[in-house]
Image: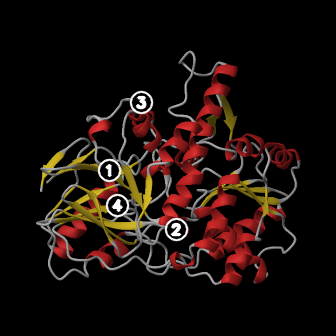
Amino acid sequence: MRIQFLGGTGTVTGSKYLLRTEHSSILVDCGLFQGYKQLRLRNWAGLPFDPAKLDAVVLTHAHLDHSGYLPLLVKDGFKGKIYCSEATYDLCRILLPDSGHLQEEDAAAANRHGYSRHHPAMPLYTEEDARVALRQFVTVGFGSHVAVAPGLSAHFSRAGHILGAAIVALDDGSRRITFSGDLGRANDAIMVAPAPLAPTDYLVVESTYGNRVHDPADPLVPLARTIRETAARGGVMIIPAFAVGRAQGLMYAMHQLKAAGAIPALLPVFLDSPMARDATAIYRKHRADHRLSVAECQAMCHAATIINTVEESKQLDARNTPKVIISASGMATGGRVLHHLKAFADDPRNTILFAGFQAGGTRGAALIDGAGEIRIHGQQVRVRAQVAHVDNLSAHADSNEILDWMSGLATAPRRTFITHGEPAASEALRLRIKHQLGWDCLVPEHLQEVAL
């Protein structure tokens, strides 16, 4: 068995792991690179193997940095099955076509306004490409084993993080390798805790927060304070949020804050993301993945006014009155939130609030670092709005939580691979694992291949 790291190395995006045995080859995760331009260019560079010769793909969860390359993989010749949990499939049915649609829209806008260096600008893949890829999905129940390729079986257990997120263990009969995917938090307000780590020969673990510990204080306190202060100034609060996971957590937070009187009951809250709207409905279907009761789920779903059409979204920008707008994407890399930033970033009464990790090279990271202007749709946009960051709303385990999850093993894996983190985070987690657990561990480089 050999593993090659095709993404998620030195970055929190682009997760792809090629696993080869004597009889088969599969890909674990198939994500898009995001952030810095040199990373995004990898999406266009092709893969170092023939997709037509790949037996299968196994997905840990639906976020685009883990699933968003699938339409191109299929377009380039992959004919096998894509294995994932049922909720992951339901979310991919929303996320992947939307990703293709946005890419088509971005390419059309670039051609219309002439701000692309490519003539004509083309999408990486289309909405139709994504719908074709969805035909190859096969769902797997949590706790069950399934043969995914000749001589290779997979076991799925819950990872927390988002609906359907899985810890995936792959076994060839003589050795087992486990992939954490994105690991959730043991005491998350909405998602269930990650399943215990089962004995394994090798472990691939994420390190998004490998060098940080979440503030134990209640994140709703600074969130409420920032909303109240913004409203008192007559300002608008813009919250870029991932359509799956973060948007729903924020909607539930808005329900809690209004119910407690912590923010004005009449303050309008809008969810401007059709994708997030559809994802929210899936919470009712997959109640075993989260902690919310039927009543709490209903309250979350009604905590914001849903914006459906582009015209309704434009009307939000035309009215500069106090309100909260939750809109995709979470790192301000695309989607409707960019139009809201263009409309409201130049007014010091307003606030742009981020509620989670911001990858290097994204607009979110630039804003948190104090950028005085950002580039959107080929234009420079001045930033005079307040920029706030409530980091402990994250759905990722921090370094303590990752170590707690790993330390439940009685016998150490032969080797642990630390991925899906920026360099400082991955190295910090490596040192903690080495010194606290005494495990053999490696932070792999991009395209590195290792024999297991």
Q: Residue flagged by tag 1: what amino acid is it? A: Ala
Residue 273 shows up from this direction = no
Give the class, few, some or many, for how many residues have Cα within 10 Å of label 1's Cα (few <14, many ≥20). many
Q: Quadrant of the C terminus?
A: bottom left
- Identify which residue is drawn at 62% across, 67% down: 282
- Looking at the rendered image, the disc whose residue lies closer to the viewer, 1 or 4, is 1
Q: Quadrant of the N terminus?
A: bottom left
Task: Give the Cα separation between the discs numbered 2 and 3.
Answer: 29 Å
- Looking at the rendered image, the disc whose residue lies closer to the viewer, 2 or 4, is 2
Secondary structure beneath disc 3? helix
First of labels 2, 3 by sequence position: 3
Which residue bears the numbered disc 2?
A: 163
Which residue bears the numbered disc 3?
A: 44
First of labels 1, 2 by sequence position: 1
Task: Give the Cα separation between the discs numbered 3 and 1.
Answer: 22 Å
Image location of residue 105, percent across then percent down: 65, 33
Give the class, few, some or many, for how many residues have Cα within 10 Å of label 4's Cα (few <14, many ≥20). many
Which residue bears the numbered disc 1?
A: 56
Image location of residue 109, percent across then percent down: 67, 27
Closer to the camera, 78 or 298?
78
Disc number for residue 207: 4
First of labels 3, 1 by sequence position: 3
First of labels 4, 3 by sequence position: 3
Contact, mark 4 vs mark 3 (Cβ under 8 Å): no
> Which residue occupies the extreme top position in the image?
119
Secondary structure beneath disc 1? strand
Q: Residue flagged by tag 4: what amino acid is it? A: Ser
